[in-house]
């Protein structure tokens, strides 16, 4: 099987394999594309939480992005954990140099276990400079609340927050509704011309570690293959929901999803 496209991920790593770069690579590969990576930080974590974060220098991050892209130019880029102002500026400068148009930003701010992954100064730069440079931003409800300084308790609140993000310069927004207390999972996609609410049954499980990383990488993969952004969001949501429903139930905390849910292995291994 030949890869359908090339996707570069700029994000932090997860030693337990459920989120971050590891989840991104698994997702992109499972969906039939070629994954490349520029690591922004190394975390020591498992399903119960994070015990340490080691930063990668902004210069080294730039070299990873630019030297990789000079040889194998990506069709799309997914951006995850950017933990400092220096890192955000380094990524912005590198993006200008490599000139890739399709960019998905997952504004990672807090881990599933509650560890803060970005500081206030970085959030400000992300809002003022990075949001307007990407094709789509994919905040969950806590992230959307931080970015817009609003309280979100309903789908209408999600739409309002999305409009605020567009006023900051966002071209397209997907506000993820997993934190709403509802039996129905509702994710809001919007831009200046359209509004779409994706509805799915919410799966009752604690094993949702890395869903945000996986979703944004799935969107980047479908988008890199020529799908529209709205269609890419729809297909990525279906992939992640199926991966949650078939999760392996690993670990004592918030376990990973099943990134291999796209595979249908017909041969028996002996």
Image (tube, grey):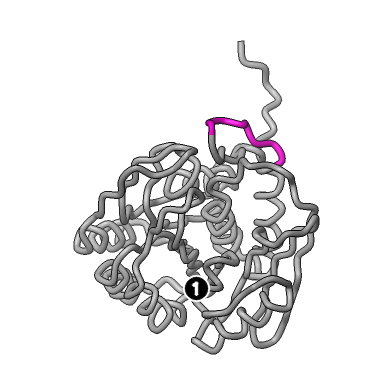
* Residue furthest to the top: 270
Q: Foreground residue, 110 or 240? A: 110
Q: Where is residue 194 shown, x and y percent of the image?
A: 72, 82
> Would residue 46 appear left or right of 138 to someone viewing this image?
left
Quadrant of residue 224 within the rendered picture? bottom right
Q: Main secondary structure of the magenta part?
A: loop
Residue 228 horizontal/vertical position (percent): 65, 70
Quick one: 270 or 134, which is closer to the camera?
Answer: 134
Q: Residue at x 75, y 74 (%)?
A: 196
Magenta stretch bounds: 245-252
Q: What is the crowding at mark 1: few (fewer than 14 residues within 10 Å), some, or many (at least 20)?
A: some
| SS for callout 1 | helix
Does residue 114 appear to the left or right of 158 in the view shown? left
The residue sitting at 61% across, 79% down in the picture is: 161
Residue 64 position by quadrant: bottom left
Residue 132 position within the rendered picture, expressed as x and y whole percent measured from the top left: 46, 82
Picture quadrant of residue 124: bottom left
Q: Quadrant of the C terminus?
A: top right
Q: Is residue 91 above or below residue 37?
A: below
Residue 108 placement (x, y as % from top left): 46, 61
Closer to us: 252 or 34: 252
**Residue appearing at x 55%, y 56% in the figure:** 212
Q: Which residue is mark 1?
A: 146
- Quarter of the N terminus within the rendering: top right
Q: Is residue 252 placed above or below 210 in the rendered structure? A: above
In the image, 259: left or right of 7?
right
């Amino acid at each position: 099987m030949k890869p359908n496209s090339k996707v570069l991920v700029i994000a932090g790593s997860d030693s337990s394999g459920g989120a971050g770069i590891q989840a991104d690579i698994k997702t992109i590969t499972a969906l039939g594309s070629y994954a490349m990576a520029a690591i922004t930080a190394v975390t020591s974590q498992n399903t119960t939480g994070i015990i340490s974060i080691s930063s990668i220098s902004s210069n080294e991050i730039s070299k990873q992005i630019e030297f990789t892209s000079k040889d194998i130019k990506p069709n799309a880029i997914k951006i995850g954990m950017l933990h400092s102002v220096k890192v955000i500026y380094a990524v912005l400068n590198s993006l200008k140099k490599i000139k890739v148009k399709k960019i998905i930003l997952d504004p990672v701010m807090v881990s599933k276990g509650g560890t803060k992954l970005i500081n206030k100064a970085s959030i400000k730069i992300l809002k003022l400079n990075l949001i307007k440079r990407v094709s789509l931003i994919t905040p969950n409800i806590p992230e959307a609340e931080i970015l817009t300084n609003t309280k979100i308790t309903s789908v209408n609140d999600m739409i309002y927050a999305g409009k605020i993000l567009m006023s900051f310069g966002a071209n397209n927004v997907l506000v993820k509704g997993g934190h709403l207390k509802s039996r129905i999972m509702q994710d809001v996609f919007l831009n200046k011309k359209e509004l779409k609410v994706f509805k799915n049954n919410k799966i009752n499980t604690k094993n949702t570690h890395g869903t945000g990383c996986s979703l944004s990488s799935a969107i980047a993969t479908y988008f890199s293959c020529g799908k529209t952004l709205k269609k890419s969001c729809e297909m990525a949501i279906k992939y992640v929901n199926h991966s949650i429903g078939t999760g392996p139930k690993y670990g004592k905390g918030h376990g990973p999803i099943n990134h291999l849910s796209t595979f249908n292995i017909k041969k028996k291994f002996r």
